Image (cartoon, rainbow, N blue to C red):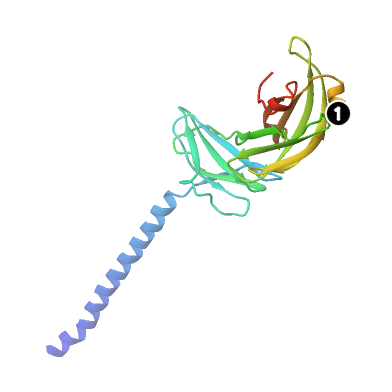
Amino acid sequence: MNEKFKGKRPNALFIIVSTIGFGMIILFAFLISNTSSHALPESRDIFTLYDTYSMTVVVVFDEEPPIVQFIAPDGNMADMESIRYRSGSNFVQYFLPNAMPGVWRMAYDPLTNTEISVPYSVYMKHIFIRYFDVSTEHDTDEDILVSFEVSADDVGVFNYVLYAVFTAPDNSIADEIMLVQGYGAFNENHVFDVCTTELYDMGGFMLRLTAYVQYGQAAIRDTAWLDMRLKHSDYGTHVSP
C-alpha cells in the first residue's frame, strides 16, 4: 500500500507543476495580448525635409484626440512628453523644434475618429535686433562705424542688409541705397565701416537694418532704424520713420 502510494506522488507533483506552468503561459499570452491592444495600429508619412527646420504638425480629428507618436527619419521615437503642444476643440498642434532632414512619420491610434488629417508647416522662432548704433568718435562725415547685435533663443546664423534711406519733406521714403549685406551669428556683436561721404552729398539719410532667417519660402525678420539726419552728438538715435 505504501509502495503504491509512493508510486503516485511524482504524478501528483507533475500535475501541480504542469498546472502552474500552463497558468503562466496563459498569463504571458494575456499580457502580450493586452500590450498589443495598446500599440498604435496605423502610421503615415507626414512630411519630408531637405534641411533642418522647426515644424508644427496639426492633428485634426472629428471625435476625440487620437493617440499619436512621431517617428524621426533615423527611426527614433520622439519623446511625446517633452513636445510642446496646443489643444483646440478638434485639433492638437505639436511643435517639433529643429526637426532633422528626412521623412517624418506618425504612428497613431484613431480611437473613435472617422477622419484624421495632418496639415503641417514651418514655424519660425522670434529674432530681434537687440542693439544697433554708430560710433560717435569721429569728426568728419567720411566713415562711420556701425555695430549691431541680433538675438534669438537658439544659436545659429542670420542674414542682414543695411540700407541708406532718403526721405521726402513729408517723411515718406524718396530713395534708398543698399550699403552692406552679409550674414552673422546670433547673440554676437558685429562691427563694420560704412563710407558716408557720398551719402551726405545726397542730403540727410536714415539707416535701416534688416536681419532675417529664411525658412524655405518663408522668412522671419526684424528691422531697426537710425536717424543720420541728426549729426555727431545725436548719432545713434533709434527711431522709426
Quick one: 66 or 232, which is closer to the camera?
A: 232
Residue 118 sits above or below residue 97 on the image: above
Place of residue 190 in the rendered image (x, y in percent of width and height, measured from the top left) = 71, 41
Q: Residue at x 63, y 46 (%)?
A: 155
> Residue 203 sits in which quadrant?
top right
Q: Which residue is mark 1?
A: 197
**Residue 101 visible (yes or no):** yes
Most extreme residue toward the bottom is: 3
Rendered view: 12 above or below 197 = below
Give me the residue at 42% from left, 49% from top: 37
Which image quadrant is residue 240 in?
top right
- Image vertical order of residue 10 relative to residue 173, above or below: below
**Image coords of residue 210 (percent x, y):** 71, 30
Q: Toward which corner of the image does residue 188 lie, by quadrant?
A: top right
Q: Position of residue 94 (x, y in %)?
A: 53, 38
Side (left or right) of 135 relative to 116:
right
